[in-house]
Amino acid sequence: MIAHVRGTVAEKFNNSVIVDVNGVGYEVQTALGDYEQSLLGEEVKLYTYHHIREQSQDLFGFSSLAAKKLFELLITVQGVGPKAALAILSLADSEVVRNAIANEDTTFVTKASGIGKKTAERVVVDLKDKVGMPLRYDNNTLTGESAVLSHTDEALEALMALGYNLADASKALEGVSTELSTAERVTQALKG
């Protein structure tokens, strides 16, 4: 299993990037946001999901561990393969997608290419309890203690690296101050 690749972006095409790792080029399919952030000639680290089928092997890459974990949840839903999951994650930032699922927003999920109403409903029903607490928006800003959780939250990623799933890591960090260092936030979450 290839857990991540770190190297220089050598080429970009069709939502895929070729990451040159010490002379070996890995073609990694990415969500739209990660594709746009990957700049030619710049170093990039992508957490990867290695999908093996009878006639092909594909790498799907994500700039955050939380996005990868959400992708892995999405492909557990019947009728959602890796490409469909990537299309859902291409709708917006992974935290926005996670929140839409938690809030049972099937209309948002159906905006993804190849995702119909029934598949979107299945995604919401299967995953709403697995993706963590929904966040509320007031005047386009997050409110409540859950507002501190973000896909770039290092404490969230640290808890997931320790074996927590996305929902449990999100719940553990609820109420933990963002003013603390990452290590202190993780320690508080583990105690709580």
Image (cartoon, rainbow, N blue to C red):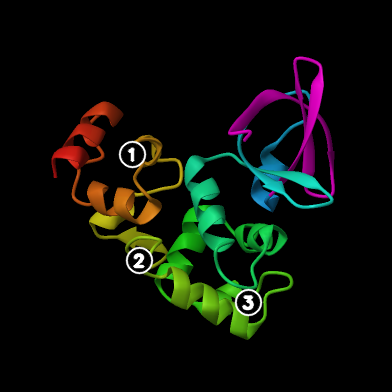
Q: Is residue 10 magenta?
A: yes
Tell me residue 132's x, y (percent): 35, 60
Q: Is residue 19 magenta?
A: yes
Along the line of sight, the residue nearer the viewer: 153 or 52: 52
Quick one: label 1 or label 3, which is nearer the N terminus? 3
Count of marks placed on residues:
3
Numbered disc 3: secondary structure: loop
Q: Residue at x 20, y 32 (%)?
A: 187
Q: Which residue is mark 1?
A: 159
Camera-side mark, 1 or 2: 1
Q: Range of the magenta residues?
A: 1-30
Name the quadrant of the N terminus: top right
Quick one: label 1 or label 2, which is nearer the N terminus? 2
Q: Is residue 125 left or right of residue 191?
A: right
Q: Amino acid at mark 3?
A: Thr
Q: Which residue is mark 2?
A: 134
Quick one: label 3 or label 2, which is nearer the N terminus? 3
Name the quadrant of the C terminus: top left
The label number, if any, that marks residue 110 in the structure image: 3
Q: 10 Å neighbourhood of mark 2: few (<14), some, or many (≥20)?
A: some
Tell me residue 140's x, y (percent): 42, 64
Q: Amino acid at mark 2?
A: Pro
Q: Is residue 27 left or right of residue 147?
A: right
